[in-house]
Image (cartoon, rainbow, N blue to C red):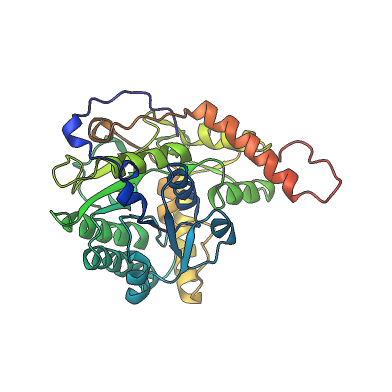
Amino acid sequence: MSADVVSADVASADVAPASGDDELARQRPVLVTGGGGFLGGALVDALLARGLRVRSFARGAYPGLTAKGVDVLRGDLADADAVSEAAVGCSAVFHVAAKAGIWGRAADFHAANVVGTAHVIAACRSHGIGRLIYTSTPSVVQTSAAIEGGDESLAYADPPLTHYGHTKALAERAVLAANGAGLCTVALRPRLIWGPGDTQLLPRMVARSRAGRLRRVGPVDPLIDAVYIDNAVDAHLLAYDRLAPEATCAGRAYFVTQGEPIGMYQLLDAMLAAVGEPPVTRSVPRWLARAAGTVFEPVWRALGRDDDPPMTRFLAIQLSTANWFDIGAARRDLGFAAQVDTAEGLRRLARWWQVERAAASPAGSAPGPAG
């Protein structure tokens, strides 16, 4: 969630010709799993802007994608036949879809993230698709300890803190192990994607703010990383352009962030201000938040509830612990640098929120200030 403005020295031998430069490849669609989501939708738009044919595979219908000329196929990642059908004739796959979250049944995370990714890999091999760009997450390495400047040499979390982190780690391992002459793979680990188009994080923050339920956890403002949506998309396109059998990035994972850590509540307050909400002023001790998680988790488990508890031990850790990463490898191997800094991203977020509010206002009424 800050700006990464560092140029990268990338050997030209590592840059594969983009399929967008090859007329034969242009005639074959690029598959985006989860094309109706926040990152997936932004990636679809970027690929269309390159003049590429795009196919989306997701559970929803997404008529907005159809209106843009996207070939929209509906299905579940756990359905091997549906995934294989979606991949027919494609030149590359961006595997973005996943089951995310801090709570839920282990079997559901495993089916979507582990089994689903195995189906994507199998479909690539079955249909001779040469490039697979996988959207992973820093959660694969996160433990209860602070991470300050960690790089890709960090081990996978053992034990994992959530079903999400565990299953994404298993999936990432499978994707990287699949790298070879016939199928080139790369995994990207974007940290906390935010910006216009967000239908998850920001709306939840606003709802909690208006309900008076936002709290700081602990006495300090821990440094964290995040990445603006356009920069996350850029990283995926850079990986797509460079991925080839002899490319340095093939078979590797990369952290993707703004490149400058920022205080968690500094960023949270800035995002709230951008949408007209007040800053978070109330706080709870870290021990109390963890104790609350210890109470809520077994209750939610006993009730079989799939919605998030008000607090979990993992969330208490996340809200009070430093987590930021060294993105030197992405700069070096992918040529990645955040083109949109945090200040500009916040301005764009505010403008988008105003437009969204205006669109949601009753006909003939003025939208008023954001928030």
Q: Quadrant of the C terminus?
A: top right
The answer to whether one can see residue 187 in this image is yes
Q: Is residue 144 visible?
A: no
Residue 367 placement (x, y as % from top left): 79, 41
Q: Position of residue 127 (x, y in %)?
A: 25, 66
Left or right: residue 67 versus residue 174 is right
Q: Which of the 4 image quarters holds residue 30?
A: bottom left
Instruction: Tell which of 181 and 42 is nearer to you.
Output: 181
The residue that appears at 69% across and 39% down in the rendered structure is 354
In this view, 369 is above or below 251: above
Count the numbered circles shown.
0
| Quadrant for the N terminus in the image | top left
Q: Is residue 25 above or below residue 257?
A: below
**Residue reaching furthest right?**
364
The foreground one among 73 and 35 is 73
Left or right: 271 in relation to 44: right
Residue 103 in picture, x, y percent from top left: 44, 63
Relative to 60, 184 lies left or right: left
Looking at the picture, how far across and down is residue 46, in whole percent? Answer: 45, 43
Q: Residue 319's quadrant in the figure? A: top left
